Image (tube, rainbow, N blue to C red):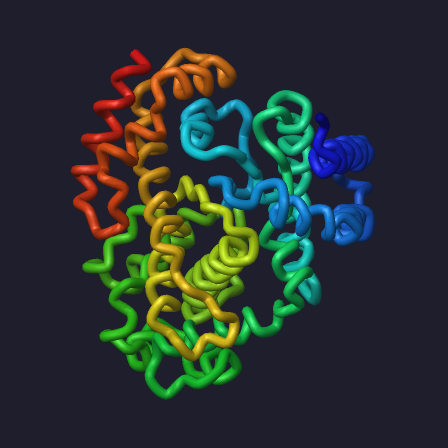
Amino acid sequence: MNNPLLEELNIVQNNYLSLLKELDKIPQNEISFAMIDLINVFWYENRNIIKLMFEYYFEGRDTYCFSAATIFDVDDRDQDSFFLFGDYHVFDDPIPSYLNTLHGISDKIYLEKMKTVISNTIKDNIRIIEEIGNDLVILPLRYSSVILNQHYEELDEIAETLFCSLFTNVSNIQEYKRKVVTIDDLLKHLDNHNSTFILLFEGDDPSESWECRMQKYKEENNPFDMNKLSSGGIFFLAVYGNIRQALALVDMANTFGVIPFIRSYIPLHYYILLTSTLEYNSKSELGFTEEKASLWKTKVSYLLYREFGKRKFNYSLGDLIQKAIDIDFETKVFSDLDYSTDEQEISTIIDVVNELLDEFE
């Protein structure tokens, strides 16, 4: 018997594909953000379908959500490991979240670059639905969580509080922008006890000077013009941005019960730190609690992604998924790890993952 919710989801995916194709036809120099905003309108109109899917169809099953990424990138076969864990798989469409962050921004260079990023995501989303739509569903879960819960401003306030806690004598963002402009200002106000975890980019070395680390951050993010930003502005862009993204991931996981799949180390780093912080923050009015099993699976899935990419398997996606089912890959991994959500040595997880990846050879 066909499931009405699944049929409705398929209709939503096909309608989204049609919208994406219409937008993709418009030359980039002619498309406006008002046109792209049709994507936000589309997902707002379908918010209740998303809510019902997670309340009734995905409920009680492991649903992994590919998030904290600009595109899925169908051609990147290293990330096929995403499909080796879980019952269902979702790509967290970032376009609505991008559009929300652009309100009030007037920098034309930045806006044009973001338009390019969104254009690339539109093209990738089209390929997802057309080429692997049977295995991967596109849903903007971070955006949808905020729409359903109506707490965008509250999330901003929590992110601001967490960011300001990194400093002494800084109580809000406005005060931070007044007090922290230069590297010397940063060194003067930064709370060394609370800021030891800060990473600006993958490969960042906290033992180096802040001046050196800032310069490397600018080099790592050279597509965006940072020449107009002060050192305090660059630090805010890097650290507040990561805190706010991690908070959105925690909110998404809390709302929909998904397991975030995060392929980049910096977003993973801040997600782990934030979930650990919120676990002990009993004052959180949002009611966040750490789902230890979910967080643990996020960590294991990241290490699997790293090790899987070293193998360069020559499977089609369908054959890879079937092979994983045939050898009972997921069950064996977590069974060999003894289903323990306690802290385990990374080397232990890597050894278990690699031993079972050998069965794909």
What residue is shown at x 55% (from left), y 42% (from top)? 70
Is residue 316 shown above or below 178? above
What residue is shown at x 17% (from left), y 37% (from top)? 348
Residue 334 % position (x, y): 29, 36
Name the quadrant containing residue 313.
top left
Q: Looking at the picture, tell me which residue is in the foreground, 295 or 59.
A: 59
Is residue 6 shown above or below 315? below
Q: Is residue 117 left or right of residue 208?
A: right
Seen from this angle, which residue lies furthest front?
A: 1
Name the quadrant containing residue 135.
top right
Q: Looking at the picture, tell me which residue is in the foreground, 21 or 44.
A: 44
Q: In which quadrant will I find the N terminus? A: top right
Residue 170 % position (x, y): 41, 84
Residue 332 % position (x, y): 29, 28
Residue 251 % position (x, y): 52, 60
What residue is shown at x 35% (from left), y 75% (from top)? 166
Q: Is residue 301 left or right of residue 176?
A: left
Q: Is residue 163 left or right of residue 2?
A: left
Q: In which quadrant will I find the C terminus? A: top left
Q: Is residue 79 visible?
A: yes
